[in-house]
Image (cartoon, rainbow, N blue to C red):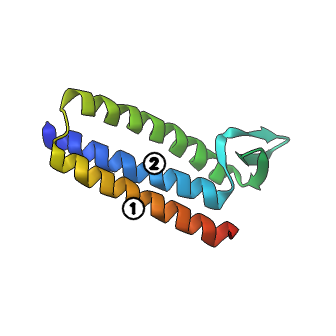
Amino acid sequence: MTRLAVAVRYLAVLNFTALVLGMVFLGGDALNGHVADEHYYLSWHGKLTEVSAAIFQYSRFHTIASFILLAIAALSALVSKPGATEIKWINRLVLGCIVVIVGLSFFKYGA
């Protein structure tokens, strides 16, 4: 059970990173976007980006799945307390993911 909990926590961090990178490169997410007259829009900080129906559905699914996975990861941390070694590696993973997100965001949007 402990290995499963650890795997869920690592997966949640990586999946959330993929979600944020998807939002950066697609132009937002579907939960904040909307559908109008068969046109699909993702929203990112008030800016709308028109996308296909498939991208819109993918974004909606990935966003909902990410938040569910994050909730499961939080519960797993409560049930099986992470040790010092896992905390050290999770912190490194989170920091690495932040560096990747910021770096790729600068690549896309500039300084």
The quarter of the image holding the N terminus is top left
| Residue located 30% across and 28% down the image | 75
| Residue located 75% across and 47% down the image | 41
Image coordinates for residue 65, horizontal then vertical, percent: 46, 39
Front residue (pair 98, 15): 98
Number of marks in the image? 2
According to the picture, the residue beneath numbered tag 2 turns out to be 16
Along the horizontal axis of the image, is 105 left or right of 10? right
Front residue (pair 28, 108): 108
Mark 1 or mark 2, which has the lower sequence index?
Answer: 2
Instruction: Check disc 1: other Cα within 10 Å, few if <14, some if 14-19, many if 20+.
Output: few
| Residue located 52% across and 37% down the image | 64
Mark 1 and mark 2: Cα distance apart in space:
13 Å
Query: Residue 96 — which label?
Result: 1
**Residue type, numbered disc 2:** Phe
**Residue type, numbered disc 1:** Gly
Q: Is residue 103 above or below residue 18?
A: below
